[in-house]
Amino acid sequence: MLQGTLIYGFINSVVLMLVALGFSVTFGISGVANFAYGALYVMAGYLSWLGLHSLGLPYWLAAPGAVAITAGVAAMIYWFILLRVRGLVVSEVIATFGMGLAILELFRYLGFIGFEYTLPPLIDASVMIGDTYVDAQRLCIVGAGILLAAFLWFFTHYTKTGLAFRGIAQDERTALTLGINADKVAAWSVAFGAGYAALAALVILPLGTIAVNEGYNVLVNALAVCIVGGLGSTVGIIVASFLIGFAQILTATYLETSWMMLVSLVAILAILVIKPSGLFGHQKQLEERI
Amino acid sequence: MSEKTILQAQDLSKNFGGVKAVDGVSFSLRRNEVLGVIGPNGSGKTTLANLITGFVKPSRGKVIFDGKNITGMAPYKVADLGIARSFQMVKPFYQLPAFKNLNVALLSPRLRRLSGGRFGDRDAMAKDLLEEVGFERDSWVITHQAASLPHGYLKRLELAKCMALQPEIIVLDELFSGLSLAEVASMVPVIEKLVAQGKTLVMIEHRLKELFRIADRVIVLNFGQKIAEGVPAEVMEDPQVRGAYLGSEAEE
Amino acid sequence: MAQRKERIDRGIKVRSDDVFALTSWREMAYLAFPRVVPVVLLFLLGAVASIYWERVLVTTCMFALLAISWDILASAGMVSLGQALFFGVGAYIAGTLNHYFGISPWLTIPIATLGGGVVCTLVLLPVLRLRGIYFAMVTMILPLMIERVIEATKIFGGTEGISGLNTLGNVHTEFLVAAVMVWVVLFSFRRMMSTDYGLLLKGINDNDRAVMSAGMNIYYYKAQALFLSSAVGAFAGAFMTHAYQFVGMPVFALDYSIIPIASVAVGGAGTLAGPMLGSFILVPLSELLRGLGGLRVVIYAVILVVCTVGLPEGIFHYLSRKYNQFERWVKVER
C-alpha cells in the first residue's frame, strides 16, 4: 500500500512537472506567459490522433509531426499576434488567453468529444514493481520527464541557442547589444515551450482520452505548479510538482479521490500567505515589470 | 552621533547573487549639507540610494535617520519620515498633465500631517512647485501631457516631485544626466535655493564639474566600496580616485 | 509634399472643460448630450422590449458591471483573468443566505456585495505585493479550482447547485434595479477616477515606485481598488443568482471572466464607459448568435484577440475623439 502510494505519487509528480515545464521555460526566457498553453497541449493530442486515424500515418511520423506543427503554431501565434503587443503585459496575457480559448472551443465545436479520441501507448505492457502493478506507459512518462528535464538543462547550458535563451532571460538589453535578436529568440522560446507541451501530451494522454476540458486542466495544473514553485525557476517547478504530486496522491489514497483538486488550491493559498513569489521565485516585488 | 548628523549609514552592504553591489559603506550626513556620491558606472551608487530609501533591503549594515533605525523599512515609510528621492530613469505618470503628476505626491500623508490635516488646493500648489523648478507659469508646458514633455522638463518634474513631499533629505539620483549645459546651469540655482531653505541633499552625479560647485563633501565609490571621502578638491587629488576614473570624467 | 493628420479639440470642448459651461445652454447641452441620451435610451429600450429581450437587457447590465469592475482593477494596474471569482463568490453568498436562512433578496444582495468584496479582497491580498502577471495567473486559476472543489466536496448543493431561490419580483423590477445600478456605478466611479484619488490609482499603474517615494502605501490603495472592484462584481453575481433563481457551479464558469474582458477590448480600457459600451454590443450580439452554439465562445475569443491586437483604442475612445475633436489634413513642408 505504502509502496504503491510512493510509486504513484512519484509518477503523478512527474506528470505535473512535465505539464509545467513548457510554460515555465517560455516565461523564464522571454517573459511571455503563454495562456494558450493548455490549448496547445490538447492540440498536439488531436493532431497526432488525426495523423494516425484520418491520414493513416504510422506513429513515428504522426507523433513528431504533431509536435512540430504545435511548435510551429505557437511560433506563429508569437510572430503574428504577440509581437504586435510585446511589452504590453495586459495585451499579451489577454491575447494568449483568447487564442487558447479560441483553439479549445473550436475543437469542442467541431465535435472532438468522445471515447474514441485516445492515443496509443508507447509500450502496451505492464510490470510489477515490488507488489505494485504499474503499466509501462507510466514508466515511459517518468522516463520522458527525466529526459526532458535533463535535456532542458543540457540545452540551456551547452548549446548556442540555449545560451542565447539564457542571455535574453538575464538581460534583454545587453543581449541585444551582443547581436541576439530578441524577437527571434522569444519566438523560439514560445515554440520550444509549446514543443514541450506537445511531448508531454504524447506521453500523458494515452492514459485517458483526449478531451477539450483537459486543456483547461493542464493550464490550471501548470499555473498551480508555477505559482507554488516560483515563476521561471526550473528547480522550483520540480520541487513544487513533487510537493503537490505526492500530496495529491496521499489525499486520494487516504481521504478521497475527488479531493485532489483541493490540494492544489490549498497549496496555492498557503504559498500566497507564506511566500507570495513562490518557493524558489526570485520575483522582485517592485523593480521588475513583467 | 553628533547632533548635526541627520543620517548615518553603517557598514551598508548588498549582494546581488554573489556580486557585491555595495560593500561595507559607512558615511554620515550632516544637516543642511550637500553630499556628492561619485564613482564609475556600476560602482554601486544607485544601489546605495536604493538602500537608503528602502527600495532595496541591505544584506548587512544599518541606516539611521534622525536617531531612528530605518534599515529595511518599506520605501513609503522612509519617504513618509522625510527622505525623498528622484529616479535616474524618469518615469512620469504619462497619461496625466505635468502638474497633475504632482497632485499624486501632494496627496501624501506626510504633507497632510505637516499642514495640520488639510490638503489645500493641490492644483495651485502643484503649479507653484513647477514654477519653482523652472517651468514657465501659465505656459503650455504646465498643462501638457507628461508623455510628450522634453527630457529636461521631465527631470525638473522629478525634482519637483521630491520637493512636494517637503522632505528633510532629498536623494537625487543623477539629476543632471542627459541635460545640456544650459539646462544644468538653470537647475543649479534651484538646488542652491533648496540648500538655503535648510534641506539636506545627497547627489549621485556623473557631472563632476557642476557637482563640485554645489557639494560640500563627496564620497567616492568603486566596486561597491568607499575609496575616498572629503571636500571635492582634495578627493580629486587622491591617486586611488584618479585611478578609478582614469581616462573618463577626471579629464573633463 | 507630405500630409499629416491634425487633431484639435473643438472650441466648445475647451470652453466646456471649465465652469463657463454653466453660462451657456449650448455648452451645457454639449456636455449633457453624451450622458443623458444613453441613459434615456436604455430605459426606453427596457420599456418597449419584450419580456425575453428585457431579460437580455438585465443580463447585459450585469455583464456591463463586471466589465466596469474589471476596468477599475486594471486602472490600478491589476489585470484580472477571473471576474468569475467575484461573480461566483457574490452569487454563492446571496444564494446560501437566501436558501438556508430565508433572507429576502433585498437584503442578501447588499450583504453579498459587501461580503463578496471582503472575501475576494482577503483572498487576493497577498498577490497585491507581486507585480506583473501573478495577479492574472491567480485570478484565472481560483474560479476554476473553486468550481472543482465544490464539485468534489459537494458543499452548497455540489454539482446540482441550489435552485428555487426567491426573485426580486417580476422582470420589470429586475430591469429597473439593474439599469439604475449600472448608471449609478458607472457615473460614480467615473467621477472617482477623475478626482485625485483616481489619479493616485492610475499613478500606481503607471509607476508604482514614484507613488511609493511620495510616501504612500501603494498596497493599501491597491487593496481599496480591489475591494471596490470585487464588490461591484459580487453585486452582479448576487443579482443574477436571484434573477435565475439558481446558484451552482456555472457561476464560476469562464463566460463570466471572458465576456467582461472581451467587452473591455471592444469598448476600450481605462474609461469605464468603454467596457460598458462593449458589453452592450457583445451580450445582445451573442443572444442573436445563440443558434451557433459552441461557436459563440470561439467568436468571442477571436474578437478579443483581434480587438486587443488590432484596435487597442476601442470604440469608446474613437467616439469620444470624434465628438470632442475635429481632424484635418495639413501639409507638411519637407
Image: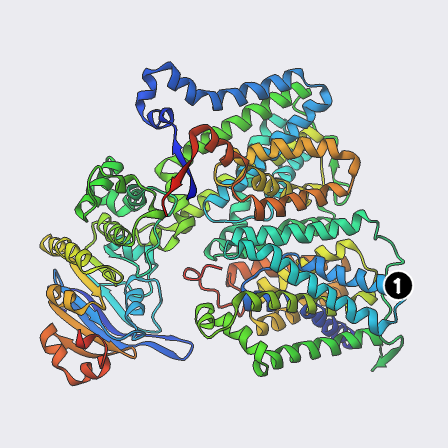
Is residue C230 something that shows in the picture? no
Residue A11: image quadrant is: bottom right
State the quadrant of the N terminus of chain B.
bottom left
Residue C85: image quadrant is: top right
In terms of secondary structure, where does tag 1 sit?
loop
Residue name at image x 60 percent, y 54 percent = A81
Left or right of A236? Residue B2 is left
Q: Using the image as rendered, state which of residue A87 and residue C134 is in the foreground.
A: A87
Left or right of C155? Residue C211 is left
C284 vs A153: above or below: above
Q: Using the image as rendered, state which of residue A266 and residue B60 is in the foreground.
A: B60
How many marks overall?
A: 1
State the quadrant of the C terminus of chain B.
bottom left
Give the residue type at disc 1. Leu
A118 vs C226: above or below: below
Residue B225, percent across and down?
A: 26, 79
Residue name at image x 38 percent, y 27 percent = C13
Residue C230: image quadrant is: top right
Q: Using the image as rendered, state which of residue B18 and residue A189 is in the foreground.
A: A189
Residue A77, percent across and down?
A: 64, 58
Residue C97, percent across and down?
A: 64, 35
Check disc 1 and report the residue beneath it: A55
Subunit under mark 1: A
